C-alpha cells in the first residue's frame, strides 16, 4: 500500500479513505473505513473513463452483479455511488495477498494448499452461478488468499448466464487470455462451464507456477488455448485428473461447480496453506494493520491541530475585542501586555498521549529518535551505534559530564514491571518507571499501552553524580518526540523485522517443546514461551553476520545452514542457541533469526529442540 496523495479523495460517501491499495488504467483502489470501523476496498473509476456512457454502463453492471453474490468466498458489496463524476464501489476488504503474488514469491502450493484453493474456488463458483452469473474474469490476480481460504473479487465483466459474449468496439475479447475458456476466446456465448475452465487454469498455475497455455504474446496464448492441449504435467497426481477435466475443450464435458467441490473434498491431503504462504498472508495483514493504525494516529493528530487552530482563532478574536475595549478606555498598552504574559493561550497540548502502533514499535528507528532528542540533553560526542535492542551513543551533558546513553525498544514487560516501580512522574499520560542500578547508572522506562504493552527504556551511565535526573529528562524528551513524529526504519518488504516474532512459531510445536502450562510474551523483536520443560525464545534482529563470528560453527537445521554459538555449549544438553542468516544487509551485518532453548528436562537435548524449531520456522520467513 501507499499513502494517499493530494489528488486522492479523503472520503467517498460515508467511508474515510486510509491508503492506496493500487492504481491502474481504469481507476484506483483505496483502503477505506466505514463509520462503524469496518475496512472496505473502494474501487473508484477515473473521471475521463466514467464520461464514456458504455464504460459507465459496464461499471453499473459490475455494481449490480457484485450485489447479487453474497457467499463466504466472495467480497460483499457494502456501498456504492454510480452517479458522481468518478463513480465508486466499496466492497468488504479482504485482508490477504492475491494468488499470483503468493505463487510468485513463495513458489507453487503443495497438495494441501491446492485442495484448499480448489474447494474455495468451487464454493465461490457455486454462489456465483446460483445468482445466475458467469464471472468471466477468473484469474490469479482476482483471487485473494486469507487464512480461512481463497476469496474471489472483481465482477467487472460478469454477465448473466443467458447473456451473449461481449466484445469491445475493436473486436478484442474482454478477459485475461491465459485463463479464459476457448469459447470466450472465440466470442461464443458463455455458460458456467467457462468459469470452471478458468479454475482449472488457475489450479495448474498454483501447482506448477506457470499457465497451462504459455506464450510470449496474447495472440500466441490465444492460439495455444484453442489449438494445443494444456500442459498439466507438473500438477500432483491426486489433482491432475480433475484439472484435466476442467480444461476440456468441450464445455459439456467439464465438471460443474458442485462436482468440482465434491472432487476437491476427496483429495488426500489436509486443506491448509503451506508455511511460506501463511507467512506471506500474515505479512500482508501486518502491513494493513500498520496503515490502519498509522492512519488513526494521523487523524487524531490532525484533529488536535484543527482544534488548536480553532482555539487560536477564538483567542485572537477575544484579544482583538479586548484590545478595542481597552483602547476605548485609554489603557490599550497595559491590557495587551497583560494578555501577552498570560499562560495557556494558543499553545499546543503540552502532554499529548503516546499512541504507538505495534508495527511502529517493530520498525522504530531508535538511532533517529536519539538523534532528534539529544540536542535537548547535551552534545553528542560519538557516533550513533545501532544495537540488538535499540541504539546507543555518548554525550556531554549541560554539567560537562560524559554520559553513555542507550535507548531500548524490546525490553520485557513482565521483567520491567517486576524490577521497576513508578517514580511519581509521568509523560504522555503514562507513568515513568524507575530502575536505579548504581549511583551513576540509571534506567527510566514507560510501558506503552496502545496495540499491546511494550517497553521503551532509556539507560544512562554518567562519569560522576546521579544519572537518574538525566535519564528521566531524556526519556521525557523521547516520548514527547514520538507523540509528534515516529521515525521508522526504511525496511524492504522482505525484511524479517516486519514480521511479528510469535507469528513464526507453530503453537503446537512450541507447546510440545516448552511444556504445559507455558507463559508467552512478545516484544517488537522477540517471542518467549516459558514452560515447565523448557524456556524457548525466538529473536529477530540485524546484527553481525554469524559467518563472520569466530565463536560460531555451522550446523544443519533441516535443509538450511545455520550457525550454533559455541558459547552456549558450556552446559551441554541444557542451553543451546542457533542463528539463521535470513538476509544480508550492509557491510558485515545481516538480518538474523535466533532460537534459544534452556532445557529443564534432562531427557532431551536443547540443541535438538532448537534445530526442530528452526527447521519449522525458516520456511515461514519472507522470501527475498
Image (cartoon, rainbow, N blue to C red):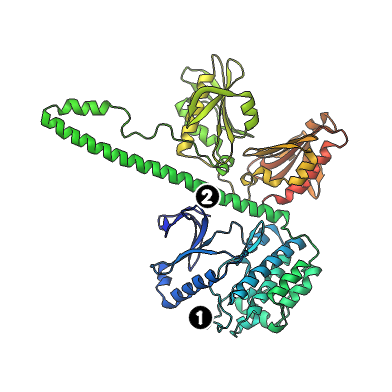
Name the image quarter holding residue 389: top right
- In the displayed orientation, state which residue is furthest to the right: 603
At x 52%, y 46%, the residue is 293
Which secondary structure, mark 2? helix
Q: Which residue is mark 2?
A: 291
Is any part of residue 624 visible from this angle? no
Q: Are marks 1 and 2 in contact (CB under 8 Å)?
A: no
Which disc number belongs to residue 406?
Answer: none
Does 488 sit above or below residue 188?
A: above
Circle 1 crowding by C-alpha within 10 Å: few under 14, some 14–19, many from 20: few
Q: Residue 168 has which mark?
A: 1
Q: Residue at x 70, y 46 (%)?
A: 504
Dot placed on the residue nearer the N-terminal end, 1 or 2? 1
Q: How many marks?
A: 2
Marks 1, 2: nearer the viewer: 2
Percent coordinates x, y for residue 512 in the rendering: 80, 42
Judge the density around disc 2: few (<14), some (14-19), many (≥20) Cα neighbours within 10 Å: many
Q: Please tell me which residue is depicted at 82% across the width and 36% down the height of the picture.
A: 606
Name the image quarter holding residue 259: bottom right
Picture quadrant of residue 320: top left
Q: Nearer the viewer, residue 460 or 144?
A: 144
Q: Can the viewer see residue 92 in this picture?
A: yes
Which one is in front, 209 or 396?
Answer: 209
Image coords of residue 145 (percent x, y): 64, 60
Q: Secondary structure at mark 1?
A: loop
Q: Is residue 38 above or below residue 499?
A: below
Q: Position of residue 150 (x, y in %)?
A: 65, 63
Left or right of 82 in this view: 596: right
Instruction: Give the CA separation, mark 1 to mark 2.
Output: 38 Å
Could you tell me residue 278's position as x and y percent? 68, 54
Amino acid at each position: 500500500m501507499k499513502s494517499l496523495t493530494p489528488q486522492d479523495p479523503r472520503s467517498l460517501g460515508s467511508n474515510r479513505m486510509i491508503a492506496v491499495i493500487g492504481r491502474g488504467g481504469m481507476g484506483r483502489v483505496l483502503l477505506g473505513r466505514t463509520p462503524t470501523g469496518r475496512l472496505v476496498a473502494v474501487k473508484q473509476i477515473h473521471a475521463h473513463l466514467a464520461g464514456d456512457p458504455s464504460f459507465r454502463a459496464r461499471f453499473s453492471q459490475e455494481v449490480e452483479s457484485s450485489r447479487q453474490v453474497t457467499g463466504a468466498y466472495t467480497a460483499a458489496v457494502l456501498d456504492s455511488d454510480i452517479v458522481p463524476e468518478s463513480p465508486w464501489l466499496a466492497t468488504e476488504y479482504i485482508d490477504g495477498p492475491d494468488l499470483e503474488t503468493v505463487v510468485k514469491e513463495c513458489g507453487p502450493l503443495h497438495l494441501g494448499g491446492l485442495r484448499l484453493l480448489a474447494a474455495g474456488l468451487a464454493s465461490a463458483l457455486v454462489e456465483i452461478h446460483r445468482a445466475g452469473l458467469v464471472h468471466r474474469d477468473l484469474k490469479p490476480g482476482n483471487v485473494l488468499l486469507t487464512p480461512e481460504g481463497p476469496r474471489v473479487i472483481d465482477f467487472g465483466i460478469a454477465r448473466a448466464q443467458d447473456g451473449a459474449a461481449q466484445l469491445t468496439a475493436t473486436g478484442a475479447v474482454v478477459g485475461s487470455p491465459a485463463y479464459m475458456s476457448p469459447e470466450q476466446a472465440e466470442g461464443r456465448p458463455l455458460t458456467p462451464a467457462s468459469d470452471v475452465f478458468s479454475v482449472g487454469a488457475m489450479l495448474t498455475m498454483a501447482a506448477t507456477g506457470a499457465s497451462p497455455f504459455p506464450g510470449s504474446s496474447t495472440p500466441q496464448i490465444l492460439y495455444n488455448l484453442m489449438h494445443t492441449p494444456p500442459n498439466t504435467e507438473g500438477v500432483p497426481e491426486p489433482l491432475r485428473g480433475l484439472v484435466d477435466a476442467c480444461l476440456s475443450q468441450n464445455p459439456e464435458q467439464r465438471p460443474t461447480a458442485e462436482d468440482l467441490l465434491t472432487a476437491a473434498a476427496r483429495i488426500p491431503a489436509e486443506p491448509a496453506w503451506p508455511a511460506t504462504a501463511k507467512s506471506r498472508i500474515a505479512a500482508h495483514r501486518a502491513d494493513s494493520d500498520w496503515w490502519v493504525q498509522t492512519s488513526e494516529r494521523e487523524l487524531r493528530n490532525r484533529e488536535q491541530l484543527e482544534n488548536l487552530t480553532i482555539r487560536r482563532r477564538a483567542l485572537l478574536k477575544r484579544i482583538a475585542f479586548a484590545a478595542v475595549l481597552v483602547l476605548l478606555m485609554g489603557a490599550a498598552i497595559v491590557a495587551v501586555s497583560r494578555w501577552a504574559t498570560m499562560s495557556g493561550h494558543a499553545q499546543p497540548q503540552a502532554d499529548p498521549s503516546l499512541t504507538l502502533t505495534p508495527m511502529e514499535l517493530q520498525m522504530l528507528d531508535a538511532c533517529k529518535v536519539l538523534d532528534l532528542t539529544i540536542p535537548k540533553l547535551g552534545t553528542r560526542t560519538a557516533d550513533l551505534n545501532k544495537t540488538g535492542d535499540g541504539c546507543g551513543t555518548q554525550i556531554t551533558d549541560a554539567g560537562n559530564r560524559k554520559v553513555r546513553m542507550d535507548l531500548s525498544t524490546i525490553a520485557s514487560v513482565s521483567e520491567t514491571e517486576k524490577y521497576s516501580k513508578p517514580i511519581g512522574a509521568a509523560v504522555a499520560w503514562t507513568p515513568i518507571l524507575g530502575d536505579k542500578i548504581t549511583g551513576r547508572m540509571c534506567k527510566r522506562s514507560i510501558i506503552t499501552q496502545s496495540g499491546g504493552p511494550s517497553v521503551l527504556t532509556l539507560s544512562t551511565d554518567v562519569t560522576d553524580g546521579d544519572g537518574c535526573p538525566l535519564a528521566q529528562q531524556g526519556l521525557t524528551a523521547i516520548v514527547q518526540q514520538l507523540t509528534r513524529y515516529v521515525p521508522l526504519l526504511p525496511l524492504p518488504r522482505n525484511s524479517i523485522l516486519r514480521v511479528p516474532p510469535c507469528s513464526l512459531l507453530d503453537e503446537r510445536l512450541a507447546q510440545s517443546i516448552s511444556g504445559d502450562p507455558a507463559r508467552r510474551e512478545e516484544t517488537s523483536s522477540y517471542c518467549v514461551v516459558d514452560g515447565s520443560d523448557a524456556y524457548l525464545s525466538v529473536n529477530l534482529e540485524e546484527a553481525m553476520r554469524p559467518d563472520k563470528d569466530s565463536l560460531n560453527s555451522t550446523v544443519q537445521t533441516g535443509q538450511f545452514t545455520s550457525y550454533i554459538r559455541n558459547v552456549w555449549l558450556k552446559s551441554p544438553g541444557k542451553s543451546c542457541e542457533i542463528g539463521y542468516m535470513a538476509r544480508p544487509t550492509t557491510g558485515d551485518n545481516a538480518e538474523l533469526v535466533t532460537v534459544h532453548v534452556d532445557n529443564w528436562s534432562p531427557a532431551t537435548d536443547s540443541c535438538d529442540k532448537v534445530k526442530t524449531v528452526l527447521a519449522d520456522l525458516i520456511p515461514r520467513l519472507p522470501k527475498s
